[in-house]
Image (cartoon, coloured by chain):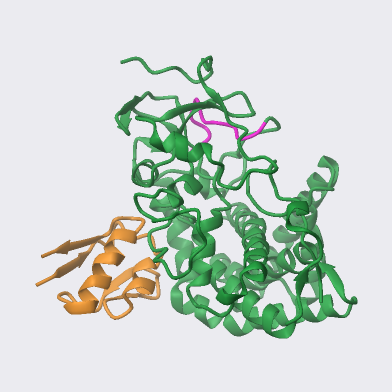
Amino acid sequence: MTSPEAGAGADAVPFVLRRPGVPFPPPEYDEFRGRPGLVKAALPSGDTVWLVTRHEEVRQVLTEPRISSNPAHRGFPAPSRTGGVPTAEEVPGWFVALDPPDHTKFRKALIPEFTVRRIRSLRPAVEEIVDDTIDRMLARGDSADLVEDFALSVPSLVISSLLGVPKVDRGFFEAKTKVLVTIGSTDEERDDASQQLLRYLDRLIAIKTKRPGDDLISKLAGDGSLSPQELSGVAMLLLIAGHETTANNIALGAVTLLEDPQWIGDERTVEELLRYYSVADLVALRVVVEDVEIGGRLLRAGEGVVPLVAGANHDPAVFARPHEFDPSRSAHGHVAFGYGIHQCLGQNLVRLEMDVAYRKLFSRVPTLRIAVPLEELPFKYDGVLFGLHALPVRW
Amino acid sequence: MTRISVDTGKCIGAAQCVLTAPTVFDQNDDGFVELLQQAPDGAESRSARMAASVCPAQAITVRE
């Protein structure tokens, strides 16, 4: 059997599937899942990859040591036309781009900060942040953009609190992080915001090294397992990984709950929202480093692989009636946070943020409603993450 | 009877077991899995099996 080399994509399907008027995940995923083997696709960058849509095979790819997360390897797919994913050589501490054993040091250093107990202890701080954000939103009148004024603010403020950013600097932090993820920002504005945040984090690390507090940066600076450069990359990674992803989940979930309010307050809702939307569908890019068989297909070293987590989370073999939003199902086993050693470190923090966000939002603003027809909502068809660019609301 | 074992060398501290079967699994201060019961039964045995199936690091082994 011969496998096509990356780049030789004559028979590859074009991978521009998310589009207006079509539900997400797109119906093509169901069709791909029904085909034997894997589907060859051409990304907007021109790279040819294998798409994986079945739950079992997505988990297999994400736990396979012969398939790497390191973009330094030949054939690693670039998601978009504009660029690739940084390597840990370019950004020290960017440990999502590392395989074991290099990855292990970072994960080990960070997991004590994300244990179930530690995240539970953050609930009062998250509640205060959500309350303050709602106060600011309500003070502005009777309408808002729930993305800009709520969904993007909460995770930015939560991460700044986790990292140890002093309260006086959180406005700066929130403003700069928003520039990174807002569609209206120019490339120059994004670069500038990114540089300012990196400089800020470097200064914060220097300060926390001398005068430690009770926060993540102080602890990691104190235990000496990471260099200051690595710590700065780690802090930036936590910020990028935890900001827009969480915001998209909060905003999409708010639409669902406003449309289907019977689920407001149901403890199972957050898990089902995570499965149903699978916003990080295109995040887990991989490259084969040693020939390996997946889904009956021999994948060759140097070929790119895209395990589609939305595909896996809508696999009817695991989730009956997968395109229905139904919190009464068991959403256990979804891979919205990935699978394998890179599974999202902050997943329990995301669950906490979503839970607090909905509890506070719908109890404090009971008349909240979407201000435009649903079909006019600007969904993110263009980015790596699925979500909403804006969510106009009134109360 | 169900026998549970955990491989702390594989554990990545994602804590899915603690959320799924909190009476069977715990996390130590370093974030790694700790087994609270080696031989759960009934509902606890079922949730322990569920925890094994969702563990992203495949660090939990269940023997019947």
Q: Is residue A354 above or below residue A242?
A: below
Relative to the observer, which residue lies in front, B6 or A250? A250
For the residue pair A197 and A63, the one nearer the viewer reads as A63
Q: Does the image show residue A291? A: no
Quarter the N terminus of chain A occupies = top left
Which residue lies at the image location 66% right of the left edge and 58% below the top edge?
Answer: A248
Q: Residue at x 60, y 74 (%)?
A: A215
Q: Is residue A379 above or below residue A145?
A: above
As for residue A281 lying within the magenta part, the answer is no
- Relative to the observer, which residue lies in front, A163 or A328? A328
Estimate the x, y position of residue A109 in percent, counting from the top left. 47, 62
Q: Which chain is drawn using green? A: A
Point out the image quarter for the C terminus of chain A: bottom right
Q: Is residue A140 left or right of residue A96?
A: right
Residue in the foreground of this view, choosing between A98 and A185:
A185
Judged by its main secondary structure, the magenta piece is loop
Where residue A315 sits: x, y (%)? Answer: 41, 48
* Region rendered in magenta: A69-80
Q: Position of residue A353 (x, y in %)?
A: 60, 72
Instruction: Give the residue displayed 59% in from the left and 79% down from the top.
Output: A214
Is B25 left, or right, of A205 in this rendering?
left
- Rendering colour (chain B): orange
As for residue A75 lying within the magenta part, the answer is yes
